[in-house]
Image (cartoon, coloured by chain):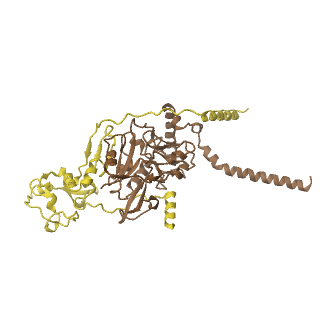
Amino acid sequence: MDEPQKRRVALKVLGATLGASAFAYAMAPVRKWAAGLSVDQFLQRHYRELTKEELAPILRRLEAKAKADYGRDVVIRDPDPLEGAEFGYALNLSVCIGCRKCAEACHVENNHDRTTNNSYIRVLEMEQGSFDMERGDATYEHAVPAPGKYYLPVQCQQCDNAPCVTVCPVQATWKEPDGIVVVDYDWCIGCRYCEAACPYHARRFNWQKPEIPAEEINPDQSYLSNRVRPQGVVEKCHFCLHRTRVGRNPACLEACPTGARVFGNLADPSSDIRWVLENRRVYVLKEELGTHPRFFYFFEK
Amino acid sequence: MGGVQRNLVALLLAALAAGCNRPQQPRRFGPAPSASAYPVTTNQPPRLVSVGTGESDARGEELRVPCVTCHSMRDKATVPESTAELKEFHVGMTFAHGGLSCASCHRGGQPPTLGLADGRAVPTSEAMQLCAQCHGPQFRGYLRSAHGGGRGHWDLSRGPREKNHCVDCHDPHVPKFQPSTPVLPPRDRGVTQQTKEASHG
């Protein structure tokens, strides 16, 4: 064997070793991810393709997983939308004081990651006279309400023409018959297109597995709403559908100390929310985008 | 072919089958909301019929004294114009509610009642009527749950609802909402990034 050939072989071996190790390193996250993935989970269909009978064992499996991961007995239900109900939400800007109790209630109710203080609601401190939510400050720490400011809580607007639904490449998010835009956390691939598309910054990405102490887990859960989300998926406000679809009010409404929030059935002409829409000055955020929100802001006088 | 490989092939075939198109299941619906079966109640807070003493009991709860403890015996014919006239009891009460005086709402007599602007007496349990005679927009909103808040069900065919009383949130003597410290400062990446850009922009 002459010298150049020896060198060539050595280079080949070196290259192959480097390539193999680089490949192994690149694939490491996938292997780690696959370790916790069962065959059932891998073969699970899209929520909307599942019959009730097929969904039942999935819910039991998720309950067992919650028990194993978080040490808490939870009940994961799948409440159906109510016949003829069209949910809407209105918020009284005349009385909101920016205390963020709604965001806190959401944090607790919806099993959000404790380390990030995550919440589906972001309360923006706004200059009086400004309607530009992009200029709002969400990180104010001083006593509220501050002089010259007003407070604009922003959460998912449950748009009837939702950009987030349009851009989802795998149809993991869609609009339910009662108007709630939901996410199948088991179908979401975490591309975050929806997060980029949302003009209201209403979607959140689970950068890491949510950390919640067992005693703080809310055991009243549902598949499409507040079950603990896996890492790497997008989540958003779902009007507390595990509560609202059984007739209850959303958690943020009950937590509001000024009673700024009105939830109800837009399809019922005698409902409180219809009264608000017909008798108060009402506006929607970024109306010019044509998203047709189901979330309204109003003034008392 | 080994057992492992056979399993792998089966898994791949199953995955392929699962990936095939399948129609959406028809959506199922829960029963529609119907006529109201449950009541809407209003909370009757203790401060309507008692006053705080500024002291706490062994459990740390505020000690309150029912109004009738004194007002069943002390029959005052007149109610003072302002808190400055008080020589004993309720002395030092802060009062910041427009240009009202004590007698704007309180009436003497036995049992002590509240008085509307037109002179009619109302029992303390109907105190909201007093508030409503000046704060119409708020009261009309309150009647439709657009002011005041509460707990319970939006759908009264599925459960009851309890509303707050005016005085749950507003001290009738100092009704303005007092400033408070906001809870749960956001720490997620989106917010901190957004704020950075805003402050540098």
Residue A204 in sight from this viewpoint: yes
Give me the residue at 9% from left, 61% from top: B78
| Residue B46 shown left or right of residue B196 in the figure | left
Q: Quadrant of residue A150?
A: bottom left
Q: Which chain is yellow?
A: B
| Residue B149 shown left or right of residue B130 in the figure | right
Q: The C terminus of chain A lies in which quarter of the figure? A: bottom left
Q: Nearer the viewer, residue A289 or A35?
A: A289
Residue A206 in sight from this viewpoint: no
- Residue A54 x, y percent position in the rendering: 52, 32
Give me the residue at 92% from left, 54% from top: A2
Q: Nearer the viewer, residue A80 or B69?
A: A80
Q: Nearer the viewer, residue B69 or B20?
A: B20
Q: Which chain is brown?
A: A
- Residue B176 x, y percent position in the rendering: 27, 61
- Residue A135 x, y percent position in the rendering: 45, 62
